Image (cartoon, rainbow, N blue to C red):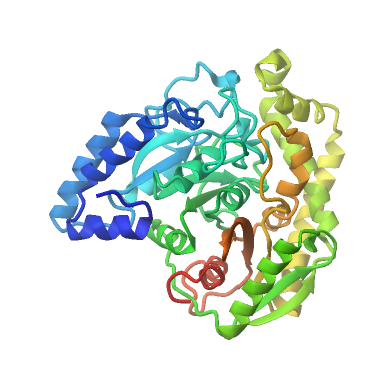
Amino acid sequence: MEVTNLRDTAAALTTGKLTATEHIRQVLADLDALDGTPWANIVAARDDGAALECAARADAEIAAGSWIGPLHGVAIAIKDNIDVAGLPTRCGSNVFADAPAADRDARIVEKLREAGAIIVAKTHLHEFAYGPTGLVNASGPAAHPHDPALISGGSSSGSAVLVAKGIVPVAVGTDTGCSVRTPAALCGIAGFKPGSGALPVDGVFPLSTTFDHVGLLTTDSLDAALAWGAMPGVAHLRSPVSGLRIGRLRGGIWDLADTAFEAAADLACRTLADLGAEVVDVVLPETDDLLGVYPIITGSEAYETHRDTFEADPGRYQPPTAALLEAQRDRPAHEYLRALRTAHKLRHDVLERLRRAEDLDALLTATASIRSATLSSDPAELRAPLLQLCIPFSVLGVPAISVPAPGDAGIGLQIVGLTSGTGGHGSHPAESAALAVALAVEGVGES
């Protein structure tokens, strides 16, 4: 029995229609089948024996009535900038071509194992997570899951591709500026970035220690909610959409020239209003400031991480990554420190205004301003259209999820959670609000 989403996989495992061993064997066979295809480089590393051992253990636990939750016995793929014990972390780069196997799991991997998940593979990423296209990797670019002439988006390229191709129900990525949300949008799946610190980054190779987040890629928002709620320490409650106040971002970069994107947002807003939400137009006058601090902070922190290896042998980096690092070499420290202070003030002031003065529970906008691009595209030219609609919410540290626009999986809609306080929303109210709106927009499950 082959199932491709989380809820059906979990149901089959708990009812005995499928064993974890059968599930993992099918996933491993599907990974084998990628050889000789345009997606042969999507898997960066795997340990089939370890995965099957975990499956056997899950089968015994489930048979004994010790079911943990919806991730128990389920195959998970992990982005290759996240440590998995026994496998190397190469970050898509020749710099780490000879990296030894990690001696311990990253904390997010530990949490997934605590939830019963089974790690089946590490996945392709845009080199060192420093780009939104998936084009830049020592093994070559990541092809779109449904059209190998197009990009997958990045930097969590391989994780998005494996979910979109129905090979794994859930994959883990990282998101510093857009790197879970953008590949989800381009590949027609859901990409959920919880708020800053909600999922641990210990054991994740850093891009920006200020803005790095860990996120989840799933078939849709219902599976994202299930996976999120299954994480140890998360008390996720389904929030009704009725009564929420949702802002549709307008003005400047938020108004897209492509009328299909505007039509998709229009439809989503009508759906939310029909379900009892109050939808209002809002502006974000701080957009340029949010966009301005991001490259200074991210670039400075990335260069600090790579300074020794880059200066010793810049030729080991892919040219687009080397160009980004080279541009940071002479940035004065006072610019970085000023940007940090500005980002801190923006986070306080913007969230205070949106939550208090505007009384908003969520925001809605597009995820990216393009659907995709060809594999021959210049990565530098794609940075703005793939990044700029996501960056503000990384700087603000708030949760955001990208979901396919109803009727047009080539367009991603981004929902940003703002709800504060804990009354009736579980342990993470902003995440619950974002997921509630996403479920309603997609029309999956009950809103």
Q: Farthest residue in the left direction?
A: 64
Q: Give how far across and how far down residue 284 sits, in percent.
A: 80, 66
Residue 76 picture quarter: top left
Asked if residue 83 shows in the view, the reply is no
Q: Nearer the viewer, residue 176 or 446?
A: 446
In the picture, measured across the screen, residue 208 lies left or right of residue 333, that is left
Left or right placement of residue 16 versus residue 344 in this view: left
Locate residue 357, reporting x and y percent. 76, 79
Residue at 56% over, 53% down: 197
Q: Give the camera-side residue of 33 and 80.
A: 33
Residue 110 image point, x, y percent: 38, 44
Residue that appears at 63% across and 69% down: 418
Quarter-of-image position of residue 28: top left
Horizontally, is 253 left or right of 172 in the view?
Answer: right
Residue 343 in view, yes or no: yes
| Rendering coords of residue 114 (x, y %) | 33, 49
Residue 325 vertical position relative to residue 94 in the rendered view, above or below = below
Relative vertical location of residue 445 with respect to residue 229 in this rendering, above or below? below
Q: Is residue 390 above or below residue 312?
A: below
Q: Quarter-wise, where is residue 54 in the image?
A: top left
Left or right of 177, for residue 38: left
Closer to the camera, 114 or 71?
A: 71
Tell me the residue at 73%/40% (across/down).
298
Report the number of discs: 0
